[in-house]
Amino acid sequence: MKKYLLSILLLFFSNLLSNSESKSKNEIDLWTVLEKKLTIDYANDFSSQNVEKFISYFAPNRKINLYQYGKELTGENNNGKIIKLYNGNIISSFIRLRIPAKIMAKSLFSRLKKQSYKESKIELLGILIEDNSVMAYIRFDRINNSEDIYQSGRGVYRLININNDWYITEMRTYDDDDSVDTLIGYDKMLKLKAD
């Protein structure tokens, strides 16, 4: 009887260990995919200021909410502002009373050109896997033609998986401040880089 009980306990603990190892592997794989997507592909396509490439990172035919907080990013108070977008055709956007993502992108890139914007550098700080989505916490720098960092900020992107690719459905941007860590629950996120 003791051998039988011991065998069951060993089997139970080995299952627990293998499940936690596979989960860790899945989390590491997801980190790798999102890190490449956001810090390399998205950063390069944003820096190119190509509207079509930029909006291809947003979930197609979906409502997209953009929340901007902080004085540095909005030029306003810390109450922030909400921009409601739709990533689909213009008529569908207007029916939903949302700004077409393409128009928002053109406006954004026009503003960046006036700032002598050259490129963005993005760093993935953490991810949080939720039921049907992932939150990716990033830090970014905007660099001008003189190679100076003229704006820094942090962001939280919510992504969903569609046909084995990850798409943004929500963005929250903040000033570059460590207090954002507490605000967004950074302590609960998976981090693969040293703090």
Image (tube, rainbow, N blue to C red):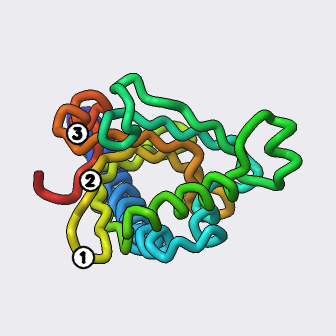
Real-space Cα separation, disc 2 to disc 1, in angstroms: 16 Å
Judge depth for marks 1 and 3 and give the one in front. Answer: 1
Q: Position of residue 190 (x, y in %)?
A: 28, 47
Q: Position of residue 85 (x, y in %)?
A: 66, 43
Q: Which mark is residue 39?
A: none
Q: Are marks 1 and 3 in contact (CB under 8 Å)?
A: no
Q: Position of residue 104 (x, y in %)?
A: 62, 52
Residue with the mark numbered 2: 152
Residue under numbered circle 3? 6
Above or below for 146 versus 13: below
Mark 2 / mark 3, whichever is N-terminal: 3
> Are there few (<14), some (14-19), or many (20+) residues within 10 Å of tag 1?
few
Tag nearer the camera, 2 or 3? 2
Dot 2 and dot 1 residues touching (CB under 8 Å): no
Inter-mark Cα distance, 2 to 3: 57 Å
Q: Is residue 90 left or right of residue 177?
A: right
Q: Earlier in the sequence, mark 1 or mark 3?
A: 3
Q: Secondary structure at mark 2?
A: strand
Q: Depth check: 139 or 109 in front?
A: 109
- Label 3 sits on what residue type? Leu
Disc 1 residue type? Answer: Ser
- Residue occupied by mark 1: 146
Residue for point 45% across, 47% down: 157
Q: Secondary structure at mark 1?
A: loop
Query: Residue at horizontal 28%, vertical 55%?
Result: 151
Q: Position of residue 180 (x, y in %)?
A: 25, 35
Mark 3 packing: few (<14 Cα in 10 Å), some, or many (20+)? Answer: few
